[in-house]
Structure formats: C-alpha cells, structure tokens
Image (cartoon, rainbow, N blue to C red):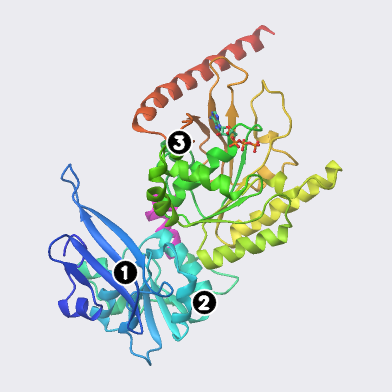
C-alpha cells in the first residue's frame, strides 16, 4: 500500500472507487466507469530496482469501451453540481475521504485533459482544480480552466502551505481549509503585486521546475538552456542538409517522451518519412534490420502525446495558426515545431523586400501565439548564403533581424565537417533569454539510430572533446589577438 501511496486511505473509500489490488503481485488497478461501463483502466506496477533503492512504480493506461473519461465519475450523485478535479487517483480519493466532496482525477496526470472527457464535466457548475505544489501543474491548471470555461473554475494556487491532497493529509493539514482557499482565475487586465506575490514566491522556491523540462539525451543542453519552457520562441538554423530536421526530431522526441505534448508541422518532408525517422530515433536502432521489433516499438510510440499537422509545402499562415490553436485546445500541446519557415512561405513574391515583410509578419504571429497560448514554438529557418568556411552567427538567420530579436533562444547547427579535417558538428546556443548562458554542444550522429543521443560512453568522450574544443577556441582567440597586435 505504501509503495503506491495508498496507506492513508480507508478500505471503504478504495472500495467505493472500485480500486483493486492483486494479492499475488505488487499491482493496483484504478478503473474508470461511466454509467457502470468500464471506459479505461490504469495499472500501477512495482518493479524493484537492482541497487535496492526506492522501488520503481510504472503506470499504464488502457482504454476500454467508449471515450477516455475521468476516474471517480461514477461515485458522484446525479444531482451534484460541484466537483474537485485532481491529477491522481489517490488525490481524488483523499479529497473524498477527508472532505466528503465529489472528487475525480485526470487519466494521464496533469499533462492533459482529454477533449472527449469534457462532456462528462458539463453538468458541474463549479470545478476546483487542485493539482498540488508544482509549477508545471499550475501552468496546466490555468490552461485547463480556459478549456473548461474559467467562469466556473477555481484554482488552488501552489504553495508550501497548500500542497496536493495526499501530501496535505500526510502532513496532518485540514483538507477542507485548503479547499476553501480556491480562487477564481482572474480575468482582469490589471493586477497588483499582492495578486502576483504567491506566484513569484512559488517561482523562487521551485527554480528547477521553472527552468522547464530537461532533456534525457542531451545533458549539455540542460546546462546551457536549463530546460524547455512553455511560452518561448526558439529559432533554429543551420546549413542546408546539415541535419536540422534530424536533430530537431530527436530533440522534440526526447521532450515528448518526458510528457511534453508535441505538435509537428513538417512543411518540407512528409509525415511518413518524419514518422519513420522518429520511430528509429525512439527505438534507437535501425528497424529495417529488425522488422520483428516494429510492432513492439510502434505500440509504445503510439502512446506518446505526439501529433502531426498534415500541411506540406506552401501554406496560408491563418490556416496554420488555426490548426495550432485547435491542437493546444484539444490536445494541450506544449511544443510546436515548424520545419521550416521558407517552405511554409513558398517562393511566391520574388521581391526580397516582399519576402522579408512576409517572413516578419509570420514571425510576429508565431511569437504572439507562443506567448498568448503559453506554448513553446520552435521555428526552423534557413540561413542566408554564407561562405562555407565561416561559422554561422545570429546574424546569419535569413531575413531581417526580426526573427532573432523576437526569439527567446537561438540555436545554430554548425557543421565544420566540410571545411576542416578535424571538423565536427555541434549545436551552438547564441541567444538564451532565460539566463543568458551561451555555449556549444558537440553532436555525434549515429547513422543506425539517426540519433544524436548521448549514451554514457559518448558522454565521457564528448566531455573531454568539449573541453579540448574549448581550449582550442581559447588558443585560437589568443592567436588572433597576437595577429591583431602584430598588425
Ligand atoms: N551528423 C550527421 N552526420 C551524417 N549524416 C547526417 C547527420 N545528420 C543528419 N544526417 C543525414 O543527412 C541527411 C539530411 O539531414 P536533414 O534532412 O536532417 O538536414 P536538413 O538540415 O534538415 O536539410 P534541409 O536544409 O534540406 O532542410 C539525412 O539523410 C540525415 O540522415
């Protein structure tokens, strides 16, 4: 019971919510019903780790008949008009046990509120969203309240004094007191500091969460960018054919595997080719040599929150923004990748000034979208033609300076393989609004898996190469300094 965080729940409550345990193996089952019909089952299984550290609890959700619904709906009396929405089954049961209030939970934690679950919430006049003391959950609660109609939503703001229901109970706090602190999401255009105070404190207390989702495949990127955050605009450039699509696919897949709901707009290569590359990167092996493993990996890949727009080639900006807005609303998208701006713009309007104006207006629209929808947008833009021997810089991004001015992050794929014997490929961060850290990350491509994923071995060699590279840069700078002096 402790392993699954159920130790403070009464058997009668577990029974009311139809929770089942398997006496023969460490497993708990949370079924979701609507009108006595089983709509989905979540299983928690425990897998002891070899090194005897805390057991590893794995979660799987299996949809059954009908649309995905919320856990606990069938426990609520027909006439009830108020409900508490939580992000875990144990939280929902804890709220019910301690306050006797109707409580339900989301099927996939706070990462998404499935569109098909919305009709079952229509009947409630008041919904309290209680997702606990987590900045990412707070972001999602704000997003969901828009989806549910903010007029009927109240939110418990994250703070140390008001943690999630399970934590609150284990700390001996009174859950009804915390519930009474639920406040409506403010609509006002003007706020004063007292309204911001709690959020500011929360951000200061949870620096790691504020920094965003970390990459598992790119530890160096975590040191530079600190993480991937909602609401930002990233501009990514690199020479033609250098591997921009390949890298950004791997980069976005990594985030998606950590629960970042992702929408791809691939205007240059078709979705089947992109899907094939991404599945290879997911499996980390060449699946054309392991066809027997296709179903195994495809089944897992299919459960990822990854979506693709069906546009190809030139496309109208309004249609793209409409599709993106719809996806944010329906699938709670947190990252949109647009690859690439030139293909989306097409080649009409041969005048350079026309093209620049068109590009600038598109960039403004994507910037606005990222901020207003609180969604990260990664924009791939080709560089202007530069000499192959020269490194690309922030100024090399095609068009006016608008793109890099509006961007929060500028990433450049530098490819030195064609111009230098020892030439390598690396990713350079040339703008980072979050904390200003700039620098390089060496990229080692594995042709079989089409991935740049850093394995333990790669990490060791990359570390020494990175240090050697930095020393070379210093040596180069000194050499150039000397030449300047001589001149
Ligand atoms: N580091 C690498 N080393 C060798 N080959 C690579 C590397 N990265 C990608 N490739 C291969 O190079 C080809 C081109 O890659 P990709 O389409 O990602 O480049 P791109 O920069 O997006 O191209 P474009 O400029 O046309 O948009 C692909 O076949 C890919 O598998």
SS for dot 2: helix
Q: Are marks 1 and 3 in contact (CB under 8 Å)?
A: no
Outermost residue toward the bottom? 79
Q: In this rendering, does residue 195 appear at all?
A: no
> Residue 44, position in %: x, y?
26, 61
Looking at the image, residue 153 lies above or below residue 363: below
Residue under pointer 3: 449
Circle on res. 150: 2
The Cα atoms of the two marked residues, 1 and 2, are separated by 29 Å
How packed mark 3 is, by other alpha carbons closer than 10 Å (few <14, some 14-19, many 20 or more), is some
Residue under pointer 1: 41
Looking at the image, residue 208 lies above or below residue 321: above
Q: Residue at x 27, y 79 (%)?
A: 96
- Whether disc 3's CB lies below 8 Å from ligand 1 is answered no
The residue range painted magenta reads 197-211
The Cα atoms of the two marked residues, 1 and 3, are separated by 33 Å
| Residue 393: quadrant of the picture | top right
Q: Main secondary structure of the magenta part?
A: helix
């Amino acid at each position: 019971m402790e392993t699954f965080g159920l130790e403070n729940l009464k058997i009668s409550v577990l029974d009311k919510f139809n929770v089942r345990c398997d006496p023969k193996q460490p497993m708990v089952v949370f079924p979701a019903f609507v009108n006595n019909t089983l709509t989905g089952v979540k299983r928690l299984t425990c897998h002891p780790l070899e090194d005897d550290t805390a057991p590893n609890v794995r979660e799987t959700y299996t949809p059954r008949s009908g649309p995905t619904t919320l856990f606990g709906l069938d426990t609520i009396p027909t006439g009830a008009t108020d409900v508490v929405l939580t992000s875990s089954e144990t939280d929902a049961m804890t709220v019910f046990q301690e306050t006797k209030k109707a409580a339900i939970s989301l099927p996939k934690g706070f990462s998404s509120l499935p569109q098909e679950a919305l009709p079952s919430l229509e009947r409630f006049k008041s919904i309290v969203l209680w997702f606990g003391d987590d900045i990412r959950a707070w972001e999602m609660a704000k997003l969901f309240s828009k989806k549910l109609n903010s007029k009927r939503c109240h939110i418990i703001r994250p703070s140390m004094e008001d943690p999630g229901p399970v934590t609150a109970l284990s700390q001996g706090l009174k859950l009804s007191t915390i519930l009474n602190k639920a406040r409506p999401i403010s609509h006002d255009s003007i706020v004063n500091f007292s309204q911001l105070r709690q959020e500011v404190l929360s951000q200061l207390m949870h620096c790691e969460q504020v920094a965003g989702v970390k990459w598992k495949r790119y530890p160096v990127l975590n040191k530079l960018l600190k993480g991937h955050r909602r609401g930002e605009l990233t501009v990514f450039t690199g020479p033609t054919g250098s591997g921009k699509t390949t890298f950004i696919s791997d980069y976005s897949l990594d985030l998606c595997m950590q629960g970042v709901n992702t929408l791809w707009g691939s205007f240059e290569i078709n979705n089947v080719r992109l899907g094939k590359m991404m599945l290879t990167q997911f499996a980390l092996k060449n699946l054309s040599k392991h066809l027997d493993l296709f179903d195994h990996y495809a089944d897992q890949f299919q459960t990822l929150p990854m979506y693709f727009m069906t546009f190809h080639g030139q496309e109208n900006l309004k249609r793209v923004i409409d599709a993106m807005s719809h996806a944010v609303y329906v699938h709670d998208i947190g990252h949109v990748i647009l690859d690439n701006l030139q293909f989306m713009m097409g080649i009409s309007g041969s005048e350079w000034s026309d093209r620049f104006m068109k590009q600038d207006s598109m960039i403004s629209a994507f910037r606005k979208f990222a901020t207003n929808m609180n969604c990260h947008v990664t924009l791939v833009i080709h560089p202007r033609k530069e000499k192959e021997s020269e490194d690309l810089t922030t100024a090399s991004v095609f068009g006016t300076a608008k793109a890099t001015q509006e961007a929060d992050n500028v990433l450049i794929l530098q490819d030195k393989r064609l111009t230098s014997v020892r030439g390598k490929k690396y990713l350079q961060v040339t703008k980072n609004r979050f904390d200003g850290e700039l620098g390089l990350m060496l990229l080692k491509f594995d042709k079989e898996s089409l991935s740049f994923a850093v394995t333990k071995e790669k990490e060791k060699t990359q570390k020494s190469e990175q240090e050697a590279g930095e020393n070379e840069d210093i040596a180069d700078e000194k050499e150039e300094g000397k030449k300047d002096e001589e001149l």
